[in-house]
Image (spheres, rainbow, N blue to C red):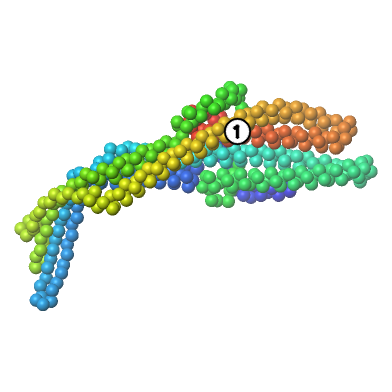
Amino acid sequence: MINLILFFLILTDTLYISLKEAKEYAKKFSVYKEEADYYNKTGINNILGITSELLPQTNLSFSYSETREPKRNFYRGSFVMSGKIFDIENYLNLIFINKSFNFYNLGKKERLEYLDYLCENAYFNLLRFYNIYQVKKNLLTYKEEYKNLIEEKYKLGQVNKIDYLRAKTDYALASQQLLSSEKNFKQAIMSLKIILGIKEDKIILPKTEIPELKNEFLNEIKKINEEDVDRILKENLNLKKATIQKTLAKVSYASAILRIFPICQLSYSSTYSDSERFYFNLKDWDKRDNISFSLSFSFPIFDFKNYLLNINNKKLQMKKSKIDERKTYEEILKSTIDALNSLKEAIEKYEYGKTNLEMAEELYLLAKEQLKVGRISYLDFMNIENTYNEAKSNYISSLCDIYITLSLLKYLGLKDLKMEVE
């Protein structure tokens, strides 16, 4: 089975990648990068839309018509330029244009930081299941060697049938465990491939090993506690977006109420009508055109039904923005507290797991030597070996859990948190 796996890895295109390279790859091909670009372009387009409302609007048109009785041709040209002198909604939008731009800018930044979090999460899971897979693969190799040895001794009558069946059963169990770890490993590869936007049939393997936590770094992350919740909430980008959205909804509501002020518009028009031909030359146009200026006022408040409906609609939007802000706040608060509790649990499991692994490894090596000289039974050794492999898997998982939780906290708002893995 192991030979088949190795053969598969050799034939398949393999990409060895570090966490830093994974992030760079994602920022080129991931759909989340495209989403971040969308926010950026939408923000620019929104600014252009707001400013364009204050610029003059121009229109140039030509038309031709014909009558049969009497037969006559008509050529018409028209040039119109108009602009709003006063519109309270446009002025308010212009005053708060920076808020609008910041909303989309935060959207872009949040998507990129979320992409970093997804990359780190998927990469550490890949490290987890790849290392556990290696543990199970090495275990199966040993089980196979031991099974073959016991089988030879059984044929020679040196061991009884019970020990022989135990060895075969133990090997079968290790094979099942390897299949399960291989499935998790493949799923971790697929998750990372999706995040990175890789569509090719590639096996992705981590370049780096899971780093040990340095004491200095461990002591630093131990200090992270519920006192950091306010700092996280203050820096959270989704919460900042929700707050800006509420502000913009208030502005929109105020502009609806202030429709009591008229909209003032100034227009200039130049038109001509001729029965001979179109006149595109400016001198010919000037000889035949009629020029007019107009100053118009419109009062939306006198469209009482739509005026009140618009106010009510904006009021509902403002209420919805307040609900969204509170909902976002509560979701971020819950996620933050859960992450802090998870970090505390992961650190405790790591410290316990590290000590437990050291003892289990020492016991395993001692038992391995004693098994060779027949001082302990195979059943006792099997229990010790299973304890050792379980301790190793738990240690690897707790270490990855710490890095994954730190990554989540960094995305939530701990911007100054530095990861040891790149």
Residue sitting nearer the eye, 317 or 189: 317
Indicate left or right for 118 with 6 as reference. left
Task: State the residue at coordinates (69%, 35%).
Answer: 394
Q: Quadrant of residue 356?
A: top right
Task: State the residue at coordinates (30%, 49%).
Answer: 308
Residue sitting nearer the eye, 6 or 216: 216
Query: Percent x, y for residue 399?
Result: 63, 32
Residue sitting nearer the eye, 244 or 288: 244
Q: How many marks?
A: 1
Query: Percent x, y for residue 12?
Result: 62, 49
Query: Percent x, y for residue 307?
Result: 28, 50
Read off the residue under disc 1.
342
Instruction: For the C terminus, give its image quadrant.
Output: top right
Query: Percent x, y for residue 68?
Result: 13, 76
Residue sitting nearer the eye, 226 or 66: 226
Whether residue 4 is visible here, answered yes or no, is: yes
Indicate left or right for 415 with 162 as reference. left
The vertical placement of 185 against 366, above or below, is below
The vertical placement of 412 against 222, above or below, is below
Whether residue 411 is visible here, answered yes or no, is: no
Q: Amino acid at mark 1?
A: Ser
What secondary structure is found at the residue carrying circle 1? helix
